[in-house]
Structure formats: structure tokens, C-alpha cells
Image (cartoon, rainbow, N blue to C red):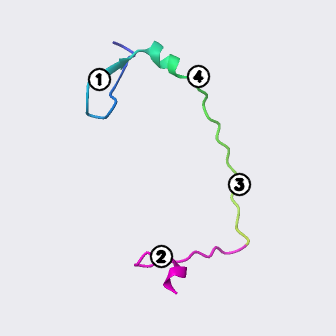
Amino acid sequence: MAGYILGREIPNVGEWTNFSPAQISNLQKKKIEIPEPTSSTHTTPKNEWVIAMPNISGALPLQLL
């Protein structure tokens, strides 16, 4: 059973299902590629951010009027 993956429909419930490497390779439609993430350089905002402070009641500021 080397290379097989065991799985269940719902965690901790039901019988285990054996998935062979051939079955797993048939599930994918395209080749799996390693992602190449891109990153940008750090910037400083031109304007300050204005963020409303939350309140205990959970009401939005417009609902308090």
C-alpha cells in the first residue's frame, strides 16, 4: 500500500477509502506548477488613513444619530 492515500468523506466518520497514485493523477486536469509570487516595493502613503473606531454596541456611526 505504499504511495496510497487514505481518506474519508467526513472526518472521523465512515470507512476509509484508498486512493492509488494512478487515481490521484487522473483527478488533475493540468500540470501542477510551482507558483512564482511577485512582490512590490514598500511605499509610503501620501494621505493619512482615517478609520472609524468600533463601539461596544456594534452599531455603525450613522446608526447612532
* Range shown magenta: 47-65
Residue 65 higher or lower than 6, as above or below: below
**Tag 4 secondary structure:** loop
* Residue occupied by mark 3: 41
Q: Label 2 sits on what residue type? A: Pro
Pointers 4 and 3 in contact (C-beta within 8 Å)? no
Residue 64: where, in percent of width, then height? 49, 84
Magenta segment, principal secondary structure? Answer: loop
Alpha carbon separation for disc pair 4 and 3: 35 Å
- The quadrant in which the N terminus is found is top left
Q: Label 1 sits on what residue type? A: Trp
Alpha carbon separation for disc pair 1 and 2: 47 Å
Alpha carbon separation for disc pair 3 and 2: 31 Å
**Tag 1 secondary structure:** loop
Sequence-first disc among 1 and 4? 1
Location of residue 49 by image quarter: bottom right
**Tag 2 secondary structure:** loop
Sequence-first disc among 1 and 2? 1
Q: Magenta stretch: residue 62 in it? A: yes
Pointers 1 and 2 in contact (C-beta within 8 Å)? no
Residue 30: where, in percent of width, then height? 61, 23
* Residue occupied by mark 2: 54
* Residue occupied by mark 4: 29
